[in-house]
Every structure is written in C-alpha cells, then in structure tokens.
Image (cartoon, rainbow, N blue to C red):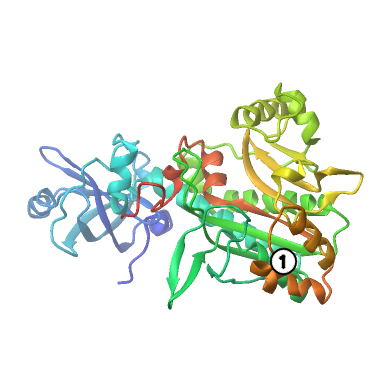
Amino acid sequence: MQRILSSHLPTRIGASVRIAGWVHRRRLLKSVAFLIVRDAAGLAQVVVTDPAVRAAVTALPEETVVEVVGTVTANGTAPAGVELTHPTVRPLGPPAVPPPFDLYRPALTATLPTQLDHAPVALRHPTRAAALRIAAAAVAGFRATLDARDFVEVHTPKVVATSTESGANVFALDWFGRPAYLAQSPQFYKQLMVGVFERVYEVGPVFRAEPHDTVRHLAQYTSLDVELGFVDDHRDVMAVLRDTLAGMLAEVARRAGGAVATLGLALPGVPVEIPAVHFTEALRIAGAPPDEPDLAPAHERTLGEWARTTRGSDFLFVTGYPMAKRPFYTRPDPARPAYSNGFDLLFRGLELVTGGQRLHRHPDYLAALAARGEPVEPYAGYLDAFRHGMPPHGGFAIGLERFVARLVGAANVREVTAFPRDLHRLTP
C-alpha cells in the first residue's frame, strides 16, 4: 500500500490507507488513545481502541517515527475533518529521545538561543517550518516572475580575489596558497553577465564579515540579485522590483497558503506604483538633520509609518541617496551629482532592498575610483568588460531572510533562518 500524506486523507473516506510521520502528541485516556501523527503536509489523528495497539502507542515517545495503516473516517472535530480508525501502528525506528521543548504546543516556549542550539528539531515545529515554507515560495515567485520577463538565472563564484564593495569587511581564506575572500555579493559578476544575456538574476549565499550583533543582521544570508540592461535610469529598475515583489507575494499566497494560515498572516498588497520620496524629503519626514548622510533605523521606522498612514502602503522607495554613501559603481544623478540614481526600498519601516543605476562607461569607472583614492588594479578583471561595450544598466538585491522576517512579523531574523550564521554561531 502506497503511503499518502495527511492532506490527502479527506479524499479517501472509507478507504484503508497508510500514512507515516512523527508522533506529534499522544492523549492516553482510560479506554481510548489518540495518536497525532505529523508529516510534511500537516497532522492526522489516529483513534486507538485495541488494547494491544494502545500499549504499543504508550511506549512511543513524541517524535518517534511511525507508520500507521487504518481506515479513514469522517469526524468534524479531528484535523481536516477526518481520522484513522482501526489502526495498526509500526515504529520505523527506535523510540525517540524527546527534544528539550514540546513541539506539540501551539508556540515554542524555549528561548531563541535554545531553539537555535537544537535547530534540527526546533524547525519541526509548525510555526518554524511555516516560515521556511514561505521563504521557499517567495524564491519560487522571484524566479517565476523574472523568468516570465526573459531574465536568465546565473550562478557566479562565491570565492573571489578581491572584495566586491570597497572598504567593506570580508572573510579571508587560503586559496591554494593565495589570498581569497568569500563573496559579499555577486555584484560585479551580475553586471558582467548583462553583457551576455542583458537580463540576469541569481539566488545564492553572500557573506558579510561585519561585526553586527543585531536582530536584523546575519554574516551569511541568501541574496536575491537582479541586473538588467538597456535602462533609462533607476526608475526602470524600480518598476521591475515592484513587479518582482508582487510575484513573490502572489506565489506565497498560492504555494504556501497553509503556512500563511498557520502564522495567521495577512499578506500585504503591492501598490501598482510604490510611493517614492527623495532622500532629502525623507530626512524632512523623519525629522532628521538635513545634512544627515544616511537613514538610521529609527528614521526608517518613521518613514514606514508615514507611508502606511499617508499613502496606504507597506512599501516606500527612498531615492537619491548621497553618492558618498553609495558604492563607486553607482551612477550619479545627472541633475544633482552629489546624489545618486540609487534607491532603497523600505518594507514596513525596514530597509529591504538596495538598488540603482550603475556606471557603464569605462572612463567613468576610472574617474570614480580616482575620486575615492582607490587603485584600479584590484578591479582590473571587472573593469575590462566596460572597455568592450556595456549598455546602461542597473539592478537590486533583496535579502531573503529579512524579507521573510518582516513578512511574518518575526522580531529576529534568526527566527526565519534554518541554521543562522552570525558573529557568535557556527553550529549546528
């Protein structure tokens, strides 16, 4: 008999079926026992009245892996309105050692460090697993949206000879006796691939050796990167980002509806045109000094609330960041050269995306590096492509874990990361 998932049980009423999963909960009453089995699709209730089967169930601790064969019977009070009756129960392994917290409770009561120390079992909890399902659906939506717009997925090196962002901290390693670094982003490579495919994207890990110990930073995270050629300016990039976010959220609703329900979420709508303010106006709205070079987290929160109350939007573009705070490859605003054709996207008051238009002429790169006192040699392989003709282009990057954390209302990005890597954690 082929195994089926718990979600298929409502279509098999009256049939004899086989399910398998983990012992989620046991309720041992005087004359009957209820066994709740958890699989990848949800929960199934098993009603045990036979004394011998009841004795076997009594000996099975929570999280033991079992197989159950029984008859699907309608019961409106059971999960999904059905239960298994007249079962046989067979362990598929030895009795499990119970984890240091109860996975059958509606919420994990253990502290986040304890959950992270025991991540392989903590992630089994429906709320933790739901966040990861949402992340998977968001990535699927990211890919599908861009595939439909003739983007090509690329895969670029994660070990590089020089840092991507000038002056940023990098993880150094030994590459067969030569110095190398873990890539901070695929920025240089995705720009070069615009010269091949015009429109590209990548889903992959990036590494930041910045000693941040906050609820919004990780030393390794998943970056959703996009680069497109033949743009007029950064507004073309913003339009693609808007459509990409809408596609991601639509796929979350379609593919991860159960996870959304488990977490009790109301997914945000993406406006047809996301509101945008220039950096100088953002400072005024946030009550920051007009010479402030960047937005602090408190400023972002104020802007997020402003966008929600005055524009009815969970999203807000802040454009025209000062060139002093943008990487050397950013194109300045031709009308205001001290400001960039760059932007950040705030999602519910948190910076989610950084993007903009890039330089695309070789002499402009040489001038930009010279103005910052940067040598050309470390970037020679990257800059050479611009000698051979590159179109006006731009792009953006979305931090997946940060997006999911904000979407589900997690207080800490580690709550939605399977095995986070940060300043203190290298295991499990």
* x, y percent for residue 427: 31, 54
Residue 367 placement, left or right of 10: right
Q: Give the residue displayed 47% in from the left and 42% down from the top.
A: 212
* x, y percent for residue 13: 37, 56
Q: Which residue is mark 1?
A: 191
* x, y percent for residue 406: 55, 39
* Quadrant of the image containing the C terminus: bottom left
Vertical relation: 39 (above or below) 261: below
- One can see residue 361 in this view: no
Q: Amino acid at mark 1?
A: Gln
Q: Give the residue displayed 78% in from the left and 56% down from the top.
A: 368
Circle 1 residues within 10 Å: few <14, some 14–19, many ≥20: many
Vertical relation: 410 (above or below) 233: above
Check the image and name the residue furthest to the right.
335
* x, y percent for residue 207: 50, 57
User: Element type at marker 1?
Assistant: helix
Q: Nearer the viewer, residue 14 or 382?
A: 382
Q: Give the residue displayed 51% in from the left and 42% down from the top.
A: 405
Q: Nearer the viewer, residue 323 or 27?
A: 323
Res 102 quadrant in image: top left
Q: Give the residue displayed 58% in from the left and 36% down from the top.
A: 266
Q: Nearer the viewer, residue 350 or 268?
A: 350
- One can see residue 413 in this view: yes
Q: Nearer the viewer, residue 343 or 224?
A: 343
Number of numbered discs visible in the structure rendering: 1
Residue 89 placement, left or right of 363: left
Res 175 quadrant in image: bottom left
* Quadrant of the image containing the N terminus: bottom left
